Every structure is written in structure tokens, then in C-alpha cells.
Image: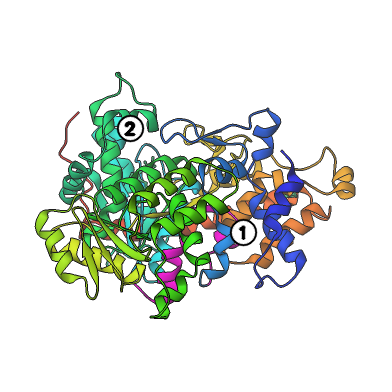
Amino acid sequence: MSRDADSHETGASPSDQPSSDGERWRSSSGLRSDGGETSAAAGADEVALDPWGSSSVADYRKLFEDFGIAEFEDLLDGVPSPHYLMRRGVIFGHRDYEPVAEAMREGEPFAALSGFMPTGDPHIGHKLVFDEIIWHQERGGDAYGLIADLEAHSARGMTWDEIDEHARDYVLSLLALGFDPEEGTLYRQSDNREVQDLAFELGAEANFSELGSIYGFDGETDVSHMQSVVTQMADILYPQVADEPKPTVIPVGPDQDPHMRLARDLAARTRYFGVTEAYASFEATPTERRLIGEAYEDLGGEDVRTDDDAEDVRCEDAADWLREHEPAPDDARQTAIEKLDAAGMEPVRPRVRFLDQHAPEDAFEALIEAVDGEKRVYDAHIDTFELSREEADELAREVELDHGGYGFRPPSSIYHRFMTGLTGGKMSSSIPASHISLLDDPEDGYDKVKSATTGGRQSAEEQREKGGKADECPVYELYAYLLAGEDDEFAKEVYDECVGGERLCGDCKEQAAQLMTEFLEDHQEKREEWAEKLDELDIDLDSDRKR
Ligand code: TRP
Ligand code: SF4
């Protein structure tokens, strides 16, 4: 992989970064310390996004190109006082996070939710997600942390006893890191009737072949495993049924992206009405619509709207215009012409359209009533000439909610980088030396850091001369992702000293090991304080399930 290209792409930095040096540091330290080099060197540039497999991302750029995940950096400027994980590029991607950022800016309602499979100890990789939920809660979001116990049982075969034990540990760490249980919601899937009911309803919108093609399910897949998928869909949309529809962010690793895409689809599929724009009474595809729009404008359509004496632009005029103007004949142009010809003398007029997707009849009737001003009612759509797109969106949601619909907004997501294992390669829950558990004895944490692989050179001399490879160093990652906390200066100092050859690995690891010890001591103290108060919380950590 080309590291230079990487730094170019990420080098465009928001203006609040003081110096170009600061820019370089941020993109380098954050975006490049992903351990990607190891896997790229091994020749793997393919990206597997498998929620239950071993997800690996050899090249994060592929996620942008191949999966349509957007770069977080592009909207960083619009996020009020971004989290350090955002500033350092650890949170590298998103789907549709803008509505959440906007809600934060405007002081409007929003929510954040993530879930944890209780299959082992919570470790410092999970801490990233805990921190993300908490950060959104501190900014006024409704916050949710859930224990994905149904998923752990069905997809990972955990017993309920094991699940109970781990569930407790996740909850304690989330609380110890600052989650406010008075303001936020903690639940386990198995205990949340509303989530299960919603899962059932959402399951009616998806079928087996779809799950098969998204997740690779086949005839051998447990039905319960499939049920855990619709349960996750319900988790993701739950904040919008527990309260009103609102922008909701799901902070997760990119391995969960298949779930996000399905959840966004299902959210749209349950909607009573679709809202689109149109130029005439017939339905057009987005490309056809664009072409018709061009014809309309060029034929002076704008004048028709403002000047009473201007002649109407008719569909047949637009068809003629397209025949003459759009040089390369393609399908959309051809079909647009056919549709326009069929509409003949009908005037072209921009409008906002409500499409009846599957609204009950009384809801459709109510929407007709609710549309103010000039409108035209068809079999399965209503055209309105005086509402803006936004007003129409709002009205559609209102009517839907009044008539028993969900009115979901598509949920958003943010994606963080996977941490590199302390032993190199992936950080994995099943390899204790590769990660630091939040329950590790502080001394063990110390030892693990001390024995971690580094991006250091063969000898101290060589290191002084060439500098260390902080971008490939799991220890540097510990600083950037965790140990430096809010302190950007400190993280930058470690980086600069390392690559400048002033910092040698022995001392560097000693410092990191000490900071890790302090972190674990402090975290575990807080866990103990919460353990005393756990009974008062509204989450049952002893399930009476068997098997
Ligand atoms: N599938 C997630 C995991 O493997 C856990 C999960 C369940 C989840 N429901 C969720 C994550 C809702 C985010 C949102 O860790
Ligand atoms: Fe890693 Fe520190 Fe060594 Fe640099 S000096 S390679 S950051 S351990």
C-alpha cells in the first residue's frame, strides 16, 4: 500500500489545526497507526467485513471506495469540540453522521447506542466504544449501552452463566468510564420486550435470501442466529421507538457495517411514505429526473414559475430538447424521452411528491388532508406544489406517527480503527498477550506493555539515526488511543520524539507501562465503587435462562 498516498488523502486538515506540522502529525499518528502495514505486506489488500468472522482491514481506503463509508475527516469541522479519537483519526469513517453533528450543533435531540457481545473480558478495544457512547451522552444525547446476550448465545454458543458474568463486567467498565445510568439506558437483549417486539416487526421486512447474501447464511445457519440479526436491527432503531424519531449514531468497528446497511434499509422500508421530487405526474428515476430538470431550466422553466405571462414548458417540449441536446444516447435519456412523449401536453412543473409505500388507507387520507396549498392526488402518490422537500419530510413523518407508524430516520454510524495487537497482528480477545483486558491486574498490564512489539530499530544507534516507526508501533498506538487521553500535545511529543530518534523503545515502553498501570488501577477502583451500587440499577445481571 502506498503510505504517501495515504498521507496525501488525509493531509487536508481542518483550519483549526494550528500548523502544517500539526496536520501531518494528526493524519500520521491517527490514520496510519493502524497496523495496516503488516497485513498489506502479507499481500492481503482485500477487506473482509464479517460481523462474526475475523474482520481484518488491510487498507482503510478500500472501505471508502468499495463500501461507501465516508471519511470522518471531511465533517470534522462540523463537530463541536470533537473527541480526541476523532481528532487523531482513530474514528476514521462514518455513514450519514452529519444529522447527528447538526443536532449537536443546534442543541436538538439525538441518540447514541452501541452493543457488546459478552463473550469475554472487556478490553481496551471496547473502551474506544464505551468512550464514544459516553462522549455523545455528555453532549446531550440519549445514550444506550446494551448487552448482546442473545447474539452471544446463538452466534457464539456462550452459556447463560458465562454470559451473566461477562455482562456484569461490561456494564461495570462502561459505568466506571463515565456512563451516567440515570440519564442513559442499559439493557440486555433478552430482557427487553420492546426490542424483541420491534425485531419481530422488522423481520417481516427482510427475508432469508437477503440475510443469506449479506451475511453468507445458508441452510446450516441456526434460526436463532438469524433472530439475533433482527434483534440487532431492533437495537439500532430502539432509541427511536423508546422516544421520538431522532438522529441516532451507532459507534462500532467497521466489521459491523453490514448490519448498519441493513438497518438503514429496514428503517426506510418501514416508512409509510417516500418523499421525492418530480417534474411531472409520472415517476422518474433520479437520472431521468436530472435530465428533465436540465431541459426544464434551459427552456426557461424558471420564468414559468415567476412570470404569469411566460409560456408553459410542456413535456413534449422537454422531450424535443432532450432529443436535440443530450449528445450521448443512453438508457436514462431514452426512457425519459419516452415518458415525456407519453405525457405530451402536460406542463412540466417542479413539485414535491409523497409516495404511498405501504401506508394504511386512513394514513394516506390523512396526509391528503394535511397537505396545504395546491396539490394533486393520484392513486398512490400526492404531488404538492407549495411545500419544500424538508417540510414534506416532516409532514410525512408526523402523519405516519399519528397513525401508528415508526417514522424512523435512517440510523448513522461512526467507525473506529481496530487496535493492533501488542504482539503484532490483530488484537484479539482470545489471545491474552495481544490485548489488555480492563480487568487485568495492573502489574500484568505493566508486563504486557513491557513485552509488546514495537516499531523500533535493531539497535539504539540505528534508532537515533533513523528514528523509530511510530506509525507501525503498537506502543505508540496505546499512547494515541488511550494513554495520552485528551492531551494532544503529549501524543504529538511521543510521536515526534520517536520518529526523530530522540526516544528509545525501552524508556518509551517503561513510560507507557506506568501509565497503563495507573489507568488500570484507577479504572478498577471505579469499577469497585460501581459494583456496590449495581443492585440499584435497572438491569438484571442474573438471567434465569437455562442451558
Ligand atoms: N453485533 C455486535 C458485536 O458483535 C453487538 C451488537 C448487538 C450491537 N446489537 C448492537 C452493536 C447494536 C451496535 C448496535 O459486537
Ligand atoms: Fe514505539 Fe516508543 Fe519505540 Fe517509538 S520509541 S517505536 S513509539 S516503543
Residue 33 x %, y %: 66, 48
Instruction: Tell me which residue sits at (56%, 65%) in the image.
Output: 76
Kindly indicate the quadrant of the structure image that contains residue 451. Answer: top right
Instruction: Tell me which residue sits at (18%, 41%) in the image.
Output: 200
Q: Quadrant of ligand 1?
A: top left
Three-letter residue code for mark 1: Arg
**Residue 164 in sight:** no
Q: Earlier along the polypeptide chain: callout 2 or callout 1? A: 1
Q: Are marks 2 and 1 in contact (CB under 8 Å)?
A: no
Asked if the stretch drawn in magenta spans residue 86, the answer is yes
Q: Which residue is mark 2?
A: 210
Kindly indicate the quadrant of the structure image that contains residue 61. Answer: top right
Is 486 situated left or right of 379 in this image?
right
- Category of crowding for the residue at label 1, using alpha-carbon neighbours closer than 10 angstroms: few (below 14), some (14–19), many (at least 20): many
Instruction: Tell me which residue sits at (73%, 53%) in the image.
Output: 8
Instruction: Tell me which residue sits at (68%, 28%) in the image.
Output: 42
Q: Secondary structure at mark 1?
A: loop
Residue 230 x %, y %: 26, 40
Q: Quadrant of the C terminus?
A: top left
Residues 82 and 544: in front is 82
Is 490 situated left or right of 384 in this image?
right
Where are the magenta residues, as a range? 81-108
Q: Which residue is mark 1?
A: 88
Asked if the stretch drawn in magenta spans residue 516, the answer is no
- Category of crowding for the residue at label 2, using alpha-carbon neighbours closer than 10 angstroms: few (below 14), some (14–19), many (at least 20): few
Residue 410 x %, y %: 35, 55
Query: Which color mode does the image show?
Result: rainbow
Residue 118 vertical placement versus 402 (above, below):
above
Residues 7 and 339: in front is 339
Three-letter residue code for mark 2: Glu
